[in-house]
Amino acid sequence: GPPWLALHEARRQAYDTEAGLALNYAQDVLHRTDETVGQALDAIVQLERAGLASCTERARAAMREIDLTSSYIQAVGHVRDGTMECSSQGGPPVALDKPAFRTSRGVFVYDVVPLVAGGPNPLLGLARGGIIVLVHRDLPLDIWTAVPDVTLEVLHLEAGRTLMARGRVDPAWLARLGTRDAVTFVAGDRLVAMVRSQRFVSTAAVAAVPAHHLEQRVATTTRRLVPVGLFAGLAAAAAILLLARRQTSMAAALRAGLRRDEFVLLYQPLFDLRAGACVGAEALLRWRRPTGELIGPDLFIPVAEQSGLITRVTARVLELVERDAGGYLARHPEFHIGINLAPADLRSHAIVDAIDTFLARTGARPANLIVEITERGFLDLDSARTVIAALRGRGIEVAIDDFGTGYSSLSYLETLDLDFLKIDRSFIEAIGTDAPTSQVVGHIMAMARTLDLRMIAEGVESEAQAAFLRTHDVHYAQGWLFGKPMPFADAAWLASSARRPSVQAGAA
Ligand SMILES: Nc1nc2c(ncn2[C@@H]2O[C@@H]3COP(=O)(O)O[C@H]4[C@@H](O)[C@H](n5cnc6c(=O)[nH]c(N)nc65)O[C@@H]4COP(=O)(O)O[C@H]3[C@H]2O)c(=O)[nH]1
């Protein structure tokens, strides 16, 4: 019957979600590895072409220049007869061990180069034509992961060996990739994702997450798919299962849903923690099926993203905000509406035009909008930066969503200009408990302060959590304590009724 189907579906969805997370980690590592290898090869080619495989003053100056301008390169040197005779770091000659292997590009890979003799972080060396580039073996693995005990590894497929690793690796994984570009599988107590580099086809990255997260996710997904004792709920779950079974039909249904205007927005109040007042709302999308069931975004946004429909969904969201709140925003310049963008939205300037149109049609001000971005899937950093700059240039504020969940990594914080960091609800949930993640929120807050970002806490359910956040200078909060997602009129009513007492408090 449907409950069994739902359990089965929960398992499939849980696997997809966890595998997606592991793939994200692997992709992150791969991206950093590609950058590292790319910079190393560029350096070698540059010095080779200039005939600078030597220790002359000119060669050493060129090496120092490369060292200073390449973020992933630790040092560049000249190697002859198994000795690094000089390097951009200065110091005496360094005797090298035998290279571990030679790649088909003619690059010799040295496993351990003790640049600082007996130093704590042995470097990896890549050498060709008398030039050696030294890189930190930890740097490509230095990504933010929300779950503890993640294994990260960079593999050389030709050589059939590990280049860099953090955590427990298993040599047997290598064979699972075969000729594919990416693969996920369960091995023992772990879920493993492997991705092959498109730039350097003999390198691949691996991420392995503990499989017990999978079981937890099956449990929560089952709870969501099987609403207790509701036949309607079961029917909805069954309907979703039928759709989800074949993503193509789900995409077709989404397309039809867009055509038939089946999407609606609910608005979750955003509270200023100090003033204790509602100062805005986040727009959250729902799909109202012709049967009357409301389907949550977790089920259809990923399909919209995979099927290329997401930019149309985002355009619809702007239309709906205009319909629900346009007039109100024009009259309430201090009210903020949070809108979720998908990574695909940040790939072109179209979203900026759509927002300009929205502002022109509604008379709302740029400061009315907070755009929330997440890095589910892969963010094209260059175009994201351009789009974000265009939005911020207009006075629209930008928040990074899902921070710490593994979707939004530390590297994004460093490279994107942002206004807000949204602390994910999983970390708020852990406040004051002895969950292993209970300390994470402190680190996230410290990071936000360092980067000069204001903070929005998500999923605040208790007064104790709110008090904790208030004392730690978190500006805004959302969550069931303040209000569940509701029709716009209700959120607007909250904002106007909540503003009065706070104005009096300010005047007193
Ligand atoms: N347990 C608990 N949950 C709370 C609490 N307060 C809020 N939530 C839920 O947490 C989610 C917060 O949204 P999000 O992190 O932006 O996460 C959103 C967002 O990433 C995505 N999403 C929603 N609307 C859109 C949209 O219009 N476009 C895009 N691209 N994504 C959307 O879907 C995600 C899920 O949205 P929802 O299902 O509406 O789920 C919402 C909200 O209903 C609380 O106190 N306790």
Image (tube, rainbow, N blue to C red):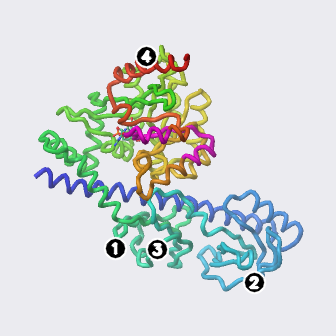
Q: Which residue is mark 3?
A: 168
Q: What separation in Å lies between label 4 and label 2 (alpha carbons)?
A: 72 Å
The spot of residue 113 in percent (x, y) is 69, 77
- The magenta stretch is 445-469
Query: Was residue 450 drawn as part of the magenta stretch in this picture?
Result: yes
Amino acid identity at mark 4: Tyr
The quarter of the image that holds ligand 1 is top left
User: What number of labels is visible?
Assistant: 4
Q: What separation in Å lies between label 1 and label 3 (alpha carbons)?
A: 12 Å
Q: Nearer the viewer, residue 134 or 126?
A: 134
Relative to 286, residue 444 above or below: below
Dividing the picture into quarters, in which one does residue 51 lie?
bottom right
Q: What separation in Å lies between label 4 and label 3 (alpha carbons)?
A: 55 Å
Q: What separation in Å lies between label 1 and label 4 (alpha carbons)?
A: 55 Å
Q: Which residue is mark 4?
A: 328
The residue shown at (60%, 81%) is: 101
Dividing the picture into quarters, in which one does residue 85 lie?
bottom right
Relative to 82, residue 163 above or below: above
Query: Was residue 476 drawn as part of the magenta stretch in this picture?
Result: no
The spot of residue 437 in percent (x, y) is 45, 55
The residue shown at (53%, 30%) is: 352
Amino acid identity at mark 3: Arg
Q: Nearer the viewer, residue 156 or 339?
A: 339
Q: What separation in Å lies between label 1 and label 2 (alpha carbons)?
A: 41 Å
Q: Which residue is mark 1?
A: 188
Q: Are marks 4 and 2 in contact (CB under 8 Å)?
A: no
Amino acid identity at mark 2: Ala
Q: Which residue is mark 2?
A: 95
The spot of residue 303 in percent (x, y) is 33, 45
Dividing the picture into quarters, in which one does residue 76 lie?
bottom right
Local SS, label 1: loop
